[in-house]
Image (cartoon, rainbow, N blue to C red):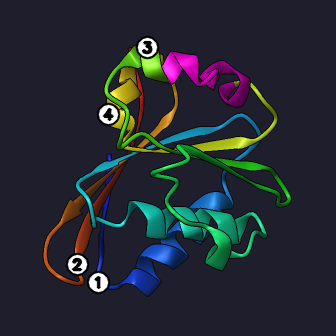
Amino acid sequence: MKVIISDSKEFTLELGKRFAERLKKRDIIGLIGEMGAGKTVFTKGIAKGLEIDPMIVTSPTFTIINEYEGKIKLFHFDLYRIKSLDEIENLGYEEYFYNDGIVVIEWAERCMDLLPNKSYLIYFEYIDENKRKIKFSRKKR
């Protein structure tokens, strides 16, 4: 498991951009961490790496899923308001997971059983106002 300490939003954004360089169609990235830990900033960085304007990327807390066109389509989920796996299944998540885009899921701990093996899991830990601990791993059954 790789661990990185981010000391700013700018660093987290750049980290997401660099991470996007390794992504390919059908990759799924689960982001896990408390509110304000950097999940959306990291997603903006991924968007930037996919040639999507990071300024248009917002946390889809109320819409649950946002789609962005870039060199690869980005599907951005926010499961904060989701209470059960049934609700996620009713969203038709499979259409997104097995599409030709990249899926980023904030609050991915709410759907761990649905994530395919080898999905990226990135854990965000709030250290202080500027610092975050970011841990990268892959899902294994």
Residue type, numbered disc 2: Lys
C-alpha span from label 3 to label 4:
15 Å
Among the 4 quarters of the image, the one containing residue 53: bottom right
Q: Position of residue 18 (x, y in %)?
A: 60, 68
Q: Between label 3 and label 2, give the one nearer the viewer.
A: 3
Task: Residue 31: give its label.
Answer: none
Where residue 94 sits, quadrant-wise, is top right
Q: What is the span of residues highlighted in magenta in the rendered image?
A: 88-97
Mark 1 or mark 4: whose residue is earlier in sequence = 1
Mark 4 or mark 2: which is in front?
Answer: 4
Q: Check contact, mark 1 vs mark 4: CB within 8 A.
A: no
Q: Which three-letter amino acid code belongs to the residue tagged 3?
A: Asp
Residue 96 drawn above or below residue 3 = above
**Relative to the observer, which residue lies in front, 87 or 45?**
87
* Neighbourhood count class around disc 1 (C-alpha, 10 Å): few under 14, some 14–19, many 20 upward: some
Q: Earlier in the sequence, mark 1 or mark 2?
A: 1
Can you identify the residue that label 2 sits on? 131
Q: Earlier in the sequence, mark 4 or mark 2?
A: 4
Residue 52 left/right relative to 93: right
Name the residue beneath numbered marker 4.
Answer: 109
In the rendered image, the quadrant that contains the C terminus is top left
3 and 1 marks in contact (CB < 8 Å): no
Q: Quadrant of the N terminus?
A: top left
